[in-house]
Amino acid sequence: MNTKVLIVALISLTIAACNKDQFTTKPQLTFKQVNQTEYHLGDIIEFQIDYTDKEGDIQNKLYLEEVTNDKDCPDNNFKSFYQVPTDLPDQSQGKGTIVIRYTYAQLGQYPIYPGPKCQRNDTCHFRFALTDKANNTSDTIESPQVVFIK
């Protein structure tokens, strides 16, 4: 009888462990896509990032940083806090997609990404990190490489 109880208990624990909540208190980011890999002046740059957060308390604090491959032009690196829309649902288990948009080096409907500081094309990638209302910060994720045509 004790063996049967032990087996049932082990099976129950295994099932409970398999159904364990996958969301964590620290926001988790996954890079979903970038709309292009080559940009010309005036193009819209669009990154899509999926997030999860156990408490669903995402705020509008997304860190974005460009990392250039052009070591002869170190001033290319662009850093910003992107304003995430404040209408993201505040739910017990937050999950969604954040869309980040910039206009390349021209006025437009989105914030301006200034582009390369040197007078040549720039190949780079971007890093992202998200902080929630409790100041928990996600791990940094990276985009694929993109090219900005000067």
Image: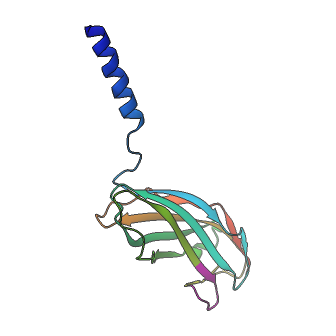
The residue shown at (74%, 77%) is 149
Specify whether 127 is left or right of 28. Answer: right
Specify whether 27 is left or right of 111. Answer: left
> Residue lying furthest front in this view?
1
Residue 150 magenta-highlighted: no
Q: Nearer the viewer, residue 106 or 132?
A: 132
Chief secondary structure of the magenta portion: loop
Specify whether 34 is left or right of 99. Answer: right
- Where in the figure is residue 18, as x and y percent of width and height? 42, 34
- Where in the figure is residue 118, as x and y percent of width and height? 66, 80
Q: Nearer the viewer, residue 117 or 10?
A: 10
> Residue lying furthest left in this view?
2
In this rendering, the answer to whether 52 lies above or below 119 is above
The residue shown at (52%, 60%) is 50
**Quarter of the figure with the C terminus:** bottom right
Q: Which residues are magenta?
A: 102-110
- Where in the figure is residue 123, as x and y percent of width and height? 68, 68
In this rendering, the answer to whether 47 lies above or below 75 is above
Number of labels in the image equals 0
**Quarter of the figure with the N terminus:** top left
Specify whether 8 is left or right of 34. Answer: left
Q: Nearer the viewer, residue 126 or 12?
A: 12
> Residue lying furthest bottom in this view?
107
Q: Looking at the rendering, which quadrant does residue 84 occupy? A: bottom left
